[in-house]
């Protein structure tokens, strides 16, 4: 009889352990894990002179150009992306993404890109950091549902130095009269990306 009781007790403990392990596994899956399709992209950029440009009367710190592109424009150009966030905090990204032109005022080129790397979200899901081979971005995260999100949005800002070709409209007729090569600038950009699961 003692052997039967021991066997029942061990069996009960094993069954209990199995259910606890299953519940724990389900609880541990991060709410952001899954396949996300891009449904929004908006970017506002301001280009600041990073040197004195005496030939056109601009000083270091002057705004050379600024503008905003919205999702309707990016989408019409063929921008698309799918991001798979995995439970091991790695990701893959595939899509057609914009590559900025070297000339200010010229639309970006859309190129097929693949990326992979790691991701981490704040415990309260207020921020997300993507660390890829091509893209390193981190920003404020908003979700439609904290526990089971199906729509997310991430906004981030960055300032990056670069050199560009600057079109100059000397006679103000709306057509560039000359192009200044290798103009040092700092681009201040704010980007919002939206995804649906």
Image (cartoon, rainbow, N blue to C red):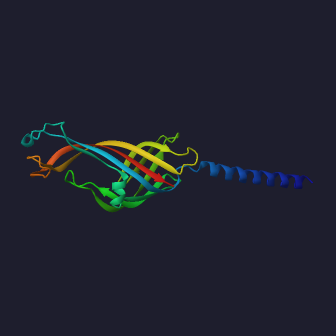
Q: Is residue 142 above or below residue 135?
A: above
Residue 24 rendering spot, x and y as whole percentages: 65, 49
Q: In the rendered view, does 50 fall on the left or right side of 147?
A: left
Of 164 and 91, nearer the camera is: 164
Horizontal side of 82 relative to 164 (left or right) equals right
Residue 98: x %, y % from top left: 31, 56
Q: How many marks?
A: 0
Using the rendered view, name the quadrant where residue 146 is placed: top right
Q: Is residue 78 above or below residue 125?
A: below
In the displayed structure, does residue 191 sit left or right of residue 2?
left
The quarter of the displayed image where residue 82 is located: bottom left
Task: Identify the residue at the far front of this view.
Answer: 173
Task: Tell me residue 69's x, y (percent).
Answer: 31, 50
Residue 133 in view (yes/no): no
Q: Residue at x 49, y 41 (%)?
A: 122
Q: Which residue corresponds to the image point at 19% horizontal and 53% vertical from the top-left?
A: 103
Query: Foreground residue, 137 or 87?
Result: 137
Residue 109 is left or right of residue 83, and the answer is left
Q: Residue at x 43, y 55 (%)?
A: 38
Q: Which one is nearer the viewer's eye here, 48 or 127?
A: 48
Which image quarter holds the N terminus?
bottom right
């Amino acid at each position: 009889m003692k052997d039967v009781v021991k066997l029942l007790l061990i069996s009960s403990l094993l069954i209990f352990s199995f259910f606890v392990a299953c519940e724990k596994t389900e609880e541990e899956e991060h709410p952001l894990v899954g396949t996300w399709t891009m449904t929004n992209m908006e970017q506002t950029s301001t280009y600041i002179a990073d040197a004195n440009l005496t030939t056109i009367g601009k000083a270091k710190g002057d705004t050379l150009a600024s503008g905003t592109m919205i999702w309707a424009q990016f989408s019409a150009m063929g921008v698309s992306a799918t991001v798979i966030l995995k439970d091991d905090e790695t990701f893959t990204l595939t899509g057609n993404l914009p590559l900025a032109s070297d000339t200010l005022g010229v639309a970006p080129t859309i190129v097929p890109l693949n990326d992979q790397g790691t991701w981490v979200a704040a415990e309260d899901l207020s921020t997300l950091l993507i660390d890829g081979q091509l893209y390193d971005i981190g920003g404020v995260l908003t979700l439609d549902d904290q526990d089971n999100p199906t729509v997310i949005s991430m906004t981030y800002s960055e300032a990056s130095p670069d050199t560009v070709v600057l079109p100059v409209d000397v006679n103000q007729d709306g057509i560039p009269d000359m192009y200044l090569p290798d103009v040092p600038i700092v681009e201040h950009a704010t980007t919002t990306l939206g995804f649906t699961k």
